[in-house]
Image (cartoon, rainbow, N blue to C red):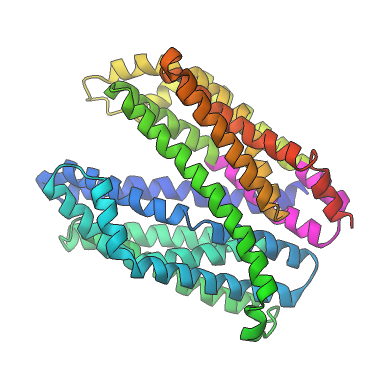
Amino acid sequence: MNRDILRIAIPNIISNVTVPLMGIASTFIAGRACGGEGTLAIGALSIGVTIFNFIYWNCSFIRMGTSGLTAQAYGAEHHREYSLMLWRSIIVALGVGILAFSLQYPIGEFSLWFMDTGSEESRNMIADYFYTRIWAVPAGILLFAFNGWLTGMQNAVVPMSVAILVNVLHIGCSYIFSIVGSMGLEGIALASVVAQWSGVLVMIAIILLRYSKRLVKVTLKEVMDMDSMRRFFSINGDIIVRTFCLVAVYTFFTKASADTGDANILAVNTILLQLFTLFSYMNDGFAYAAEALTGRFIGAHDGASLRRCIKLCLIWCFAVSFIFIGVYIGWWRDIFTLLVNPEQGDSAVLLSVAEEYIGWIIAIPLAAAMPFVMDGIMVGATRSRIMRNSMIWSSVCYFAILYGLGWLIGNNALWMAFTMYMFLRGVFQYFMSDRLRDIYREAER
């Protein structure tokens, strides 16, 4: 069982790690491709990436909705059903991708207005980046569908390999287009288009080569079966609400940091949140393992294996949490210093401010160990309503603490709210599923 968990978790952890590496490389290239406007370009790139993260984040329901249903079909050895799930996810992804592309002008203009930097030059840079990279959106959403389907099929190696390929292509093409071709930010955006569409082509080729003998021929009528599509969209609808709450929490975290009016607190909160992100990359891998294996064992009606799987996934997540707590206690200053420019005059001030709040970062890995695995379990069991409701109530608690105590304890209220939000997500899901008994009963039918 541990081998099965690690077989899925480790490739996903590696895939996660390539994302910040690509971001660092893109920032490096942007700063050098635009000469004397390097600082302006880095800021414009950051805003442009934020806009696309918002689009992609809100489309992640396609991956999660596909993964659980596919895993259950795989566990039950229903070849026709997981073949149908592949086509359904592709159709939905294409529909959402084409819709986003066709609405590029209103999305782009609203984003430029909302993220107004006050600089016409910066606005033009962001616009060039946005209207070039928008051509990659249908491909990026299609990759969500393929990754969800492959995760459900217990295959984490192919998504990892394609993710590495896409990110390496992105870095290489960014250098060629932006620095050699002197295209600036537009070159980085074009690199994303080339890399993501290349990823789609490679993914299609791999699926045809590896799964053509296992896939069953299906008709369009079967793919568009109303009952099956209704279930698919019901699950995805719950996940969309859940994702909206997630985006709201992170958006208001940044807003609350900025509303303090203290640039040092904003900078420190941003850096400390990156430390939490490092931890989340690790535990996310075990969440993927939990969703793939939970769906598989429910489909196979193997309750004993499901219990062992959930128990071991929780043990792994808590083990990772304790490792990160130890790392943060012993070396948080060294890690923090790496994320701050040593030539920056106020770096000592930032370190001093960080000391006031580092206790929250040490506590969060323990508070957040459970929700990652619980998310994976609920995705695999297709209990999207529990995910939705737990996220709504956790978000309500987050905002209640943030605005109820903010006037009294300042920035500590923000970190308390965020820590409790993470902790309560796992607790609510545990009790809303009757302490996981509902999930076990589903596998034991």
Q: Main secondary structure of the magenta part?
A: helix
**Region of the chain picked out in magenta, as a range:** 281-310
Instruction: Name the quarter where the C terminus is drawn.
Output: bottom right
Front position in the image: 161 or 227 = 227
Asked whether residue 352 is in view, the answer is yes
| Residue shown at the point (77%, 73%) measured from the top left | 78
Q: Residue 233's quadrant in the figure? A: bottom right
Residue 435 coordinates in the image, percent (x, y):
79, 38
Residue 122 point in image, percent of width and height: 16, 48
Residue 370, percent across and down?
Answer: 67, 35
Residue shown at the point (21%, 20%) measured from the top left: 345
Quadrant position of residue 220 = bottom right
Q: Is 317 displayed left or right of 179 in the figure?
A: right
Q: Can residue 194 be seen in this view?
A: no
Q: Residue at x 76, y 41 (%)?
A: 312
- Examine the structure image and report whether residue 189 is included in the region drawn in magenta: no
Q: In this view, does 219 lie above or below 132?
A: below
Q: Residue furthest left?
A: 36
Residue 228 at what x, y percent from top left?
A: 68, 71
Relative depth, front residue between 376 and 162? 376
Residue for point 55% across, 27% down: 419
Give left or right: position of 292 versus 47: right
* Count of numbered circles in the view: 0
Residues 209 and 404: in front is 404
Is residue 289 a member of the stretch shown in magenta? yes
Give left or right: position of 241 versus 24: right
| Left or right relative to 387: residue 418 | left
Q: Quadrant of residue 393?
A: top right
Is residue 194 depicted above or below 264 in this figure?
below
